[in-house]
């Protein structure tokens, strides 16, 4: 099929390229018009989560959609709220915000209107002004941008500090930071990847083709994300995911095709024959690898958490588009270029270019091959032992969710967090909501609420006594609790867990009422619970699928067992390095990263799904060459040596490109992007160099013909090959 697609595309190259151009233009238009409305920073869970049930009850029977509130802070080092200049400053900022009109702000309060001492800090040098914004979160973000402009203009004037905090303004700043990291990742990743491609190919034209294909895949995938997001809103992180994974796999897949195309042309085939041959050989490897990545990514769809599902949708889309473009658009481009693919040679970098297997009998990889094959046990121990040691550090991992306190220094939201936490409590921005579903006016429910209030008043974690708000029907009550610290922190989550598991059951024992806890902290607690429950299922899905596919392709049970072990080894080592670098501060400053109290709870599971899919690329590429040679010669040692030296250059080059792309995103400002980029870059590097180029061939040398053992009761399995057998 891949050869047929390559032949059709190569014989009608202009038509194929025109079709892709139209698709890219339409997708670009969709992305420009719809992408903003397709994504959100709002953290939501499925209807089965307890926090979501609480939110739905409040929306249906008490207050409608959750109100979006901004809290503007005015602070002075020298003046108090009792000074006229302080009052003038507050009323000026308040008036500017209210002047935005009822289409932006529906309600606003300040201390001089209410006289409420709760709006003033104990030292009377800080005051709060709450404002309610119009619309849902996406609409409120636009209003928050205007408030941010007013606040930034007033900040630092006349010795006053003016800040704002709230769901909408935090979301705005989060989007800005994500966009900054996205642009920085592109600025760093693409040029470095281009340099590596020039070094691999020796010519500029050959190097530009993979970059162009990756960009097309990203544009088309973002257009589809914008379209899908109109029906199922996706998290904002999906755009960064599409770009990062699109650059990595788009360049990676086209690298294999372009390398094979040049190899076939050097062997004497004309451009159409070389294109078709590349499609029927390397194209099959790309197809198999891409489908494997997609199915591994499907593991994240198992988790009933829209954040995971959004990342999975974005990654699956861009891999699928990159796959389609590699099998159709790239053959058309190569057919047009023909020998001109070697235009603009770069002599200095070109001396590093990858050559075909028949010309790789000398050099670095031949030296490595000889050493690995001569000392296989030593090679295994030299690589496996340090990786196992790194994996041990994973067991010290502390997971959580990064909040505004983890934003880069100097960011408005971060500064507002510390001012609120020092003078009031940041919990007023995102309070915990206890929802009582039952006959609130009945004596037994009233008594239970009073018992809950009394028990909470004795716990310093709940500094403000909750006052019930009851709906008109008298069948639903809301108790709003303010707890200290960042709402997504482990301490806040532990407080909610205590509320759910201790205080509420004790107060409502035997009472006919359903009590739920909502709010950001409750959502975070539910996320932790969901990740813990579904992680084994994702692992089983991905590992089981990998085992079955490799067993079918290589007709062996030894090969898939080793693959699973080695993939787990590279993933485990990357987990350990995450802990060492971000939590234990090993080389943190040297690498330009920031210390993190936690690794985001979703990152290990996400890295596992992504890396298991990507690592299959290199594993299949290497083993398919070894199996092909073994079938031809029957000599396991010679086949392993041939497979290593004929693929190591391409595998290492492809891995370096992925490392460059992921590393570019790791240099962003946000801790989340640093952790994701670093984890992916390190794991790919370890997997493609140490694991594939040393552990795999060394272990195959030790096992010999036992590598290809298949029990007789499985002999009925079909003989599936990634690449067809080649002529001598």
Image (tube, rainbow, N blue to C red):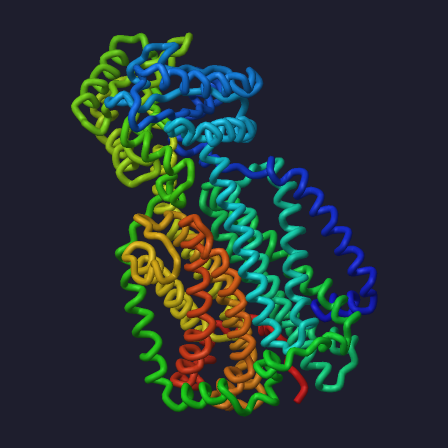
Closer to the camera, 394 or 557? 394
In percent of the image, x 70 and y 68: which residue is there?
A: 2
In the picture, measured across the screen, residue 472 lies left or right of residue 187, that is left
Q: Is residue 583 above or below residue 355?
A: above
On-image quarter of the N terminus: bottom right
Closer to the camera, 684 or 53? 684
Where in the figure is residue 443, as x and y percent of width and height?
25, 8
In percent of the image, x 37 and y 52: which residue is there?
A: 536
Residue that sits furthest to the front in the current view = 158
Res. 722 image quadrant: bottom right
Q: Is residue 721 above or below residue 190?
A: below
Where in the figure is residue 618, as x and y percent of width and height?
52, 71
Closer to the camera, 6 or 88? 88
In percent of the image, x 34 and y 59: which residue is there?
A: 588
Closer to the camera, 670 or 64? 670
In the picture, measured across the screen, residue 114 lies left or right of residue 458, that is right
Res. 124 image quadrant: top left
In the picture, measured across the screen, residue 219 lies left or right of residue 605, that is right
In percent of the image, x 58 and y 62: which residue is there?
A: 190
Q: Is residue 514 visible?
A: no
Q: Is residue 469 visible?
A: yes
On-image quarter of the C terminus: bottom right
In the picture, measured across the screen, residue 177 lies left or right of residue 354, that is left
Tell me how many marks there are: 0
Where in the figure is residue 189, as x and y percent of width and height?
54, 61
Q: Is residue 663 above or below residue 433?
A: below
């Amino acid at each position: 099929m891949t050869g047929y697609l390559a032949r059709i595309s190569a014989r009608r190259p202009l038509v194929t390229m025109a079709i892709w151009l139209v698709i890219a233009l339409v997708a670009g238009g969709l992305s420009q018009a719809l992408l903003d409305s397709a994504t959100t920073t709002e953290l939501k869970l499925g209807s089965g989560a307890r926090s979501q049930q609480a939110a739905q009850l409040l929306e249906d029977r008490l207050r409608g959609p959750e109100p979006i509130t901004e809290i503007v802070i005015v602070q002075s080092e020298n003046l108090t709220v009792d000074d006229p200049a302080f009052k003038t400053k507050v009323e000026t900022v308040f008036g500017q915000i209210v002047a935005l009109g009822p289409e932006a702000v529906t309600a606003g309060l300040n201390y001089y209107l209410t006289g409420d001492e709760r709006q003033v800090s104990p030292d009377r040098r800080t005051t709060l002004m709450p404002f309610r914004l119009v619309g849902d979160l996406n609409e409120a973000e636009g209003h928050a941008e205007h408030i941010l402009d007013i606040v930034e203009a007033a900040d630092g004037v006349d010795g006053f500090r003016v800040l704002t905090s709230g769901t909408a303004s935090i979301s705005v700043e989060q989007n800005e930071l994500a966009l900054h990291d996205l642009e920085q990742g592109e600025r760093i990743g693409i040029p470095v990847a281009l340099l590596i491609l020039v070094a691999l190919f020796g010519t500029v034209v050959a190097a530009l083709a993979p970059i162009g294909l990756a960009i097309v895949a990203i544009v088309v995938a973002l257009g589809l994300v914008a379209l899908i997001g109109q029906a199922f809103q996706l998290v904002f992180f999906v755009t960064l995911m599409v770009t990062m994974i699109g650059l990595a796999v788009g360049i990676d897949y086209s690298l294999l095709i372009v390398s094979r195309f040049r190899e076939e042309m050097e062997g004497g085939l004309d451009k159409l024959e070389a294109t078709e041959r590349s499609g029927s050989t390397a194209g099959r490897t790309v197809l198999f690898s891409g489908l494997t990545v997609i199915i591994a990514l499907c593991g994240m769809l198992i988790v009933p958490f829209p954040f995971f599902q959004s990342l999975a949708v974005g990654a699956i889309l861009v891999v699928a588009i990159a796959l389609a473009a590699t099998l159709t658009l790239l053959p058309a481009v190569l057919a047009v270029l023909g020998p001109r693919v070697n235009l603009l040679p770069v002599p200095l970098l070109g001396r590093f270019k990858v050559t075909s297997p028949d010309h790789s009998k000398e050099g670095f990889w031949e030296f490595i091959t000889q050493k690995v094959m001569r000392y296989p046990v030593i090679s295994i121990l030299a690589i496996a032992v340090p990786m196992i040691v790194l994996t041990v550090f994973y067991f010290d991992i502390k997971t959580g969710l990064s909040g505004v306190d983890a934003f880069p220094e100097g960011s408005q939201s971060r500064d507002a967090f510390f001012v609120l936490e020092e003078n009031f409590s940041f919990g007023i921005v995102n309070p915990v909501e206890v929802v009582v579903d039952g006959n609130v006016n009945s004596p037994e429910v009233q008594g239970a609420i009073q018992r809950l209030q009394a028990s909470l008043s004795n716990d310093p974690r709940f500094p403000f006594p909750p006052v019930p708000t009851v709906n008109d029907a008298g069948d639903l009550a809301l108790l709003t609790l303010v707890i200290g610290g960042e709402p997504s922190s482990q301490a806040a989550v532990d407080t909610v867990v205590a509320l759910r598991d201790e205080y509420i059951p004790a107060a409502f024992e035997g009472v006919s009422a359903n009590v739920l806890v909502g709010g950001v902290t409750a959502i975070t607690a539910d996320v932790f619970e969901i990740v813990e429950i579904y992680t084994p299922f994702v692992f089983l899905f991905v590992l089981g699928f990998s085992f079955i596919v490799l067993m079918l392709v290589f007709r062996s049970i030894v090969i898939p067992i080793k693959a699973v072990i080695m993939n787990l080894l590279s993933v485990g080592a990357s987990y350990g390095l995450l802990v060492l670098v971000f939590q234990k501060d090993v080389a943190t400053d040297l690498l330009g990263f920031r210390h993190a109290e936690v690794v985001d709870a979703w990152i290990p599971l996400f890295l596992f799904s992504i890396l298991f899919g990507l690592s299959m690329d290199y594993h299949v590429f290497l083993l398919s060459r070894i199996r092909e040679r073994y079938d031809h010669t029957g000599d396991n040692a010679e086949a392993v040596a041939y497979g290593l030296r004929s693929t190591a250059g391409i595998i290492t080059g492809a891995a370096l490109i992925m490392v460059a792309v992921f590393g570019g995103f790791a240099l962003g400002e946000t801790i989340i992007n640093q952790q994701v980029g670093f984890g992916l870059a390190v794991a790919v590097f370890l997997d493609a160099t140490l694991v594939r180029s040393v552990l795999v061939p060394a272990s195959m040398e030790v096992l010999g013909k036992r590598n290809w053992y298949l029990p007789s009761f499985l002999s009925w399995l079909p003989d599936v090959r990634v690449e067809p057998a080649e002529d001598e």
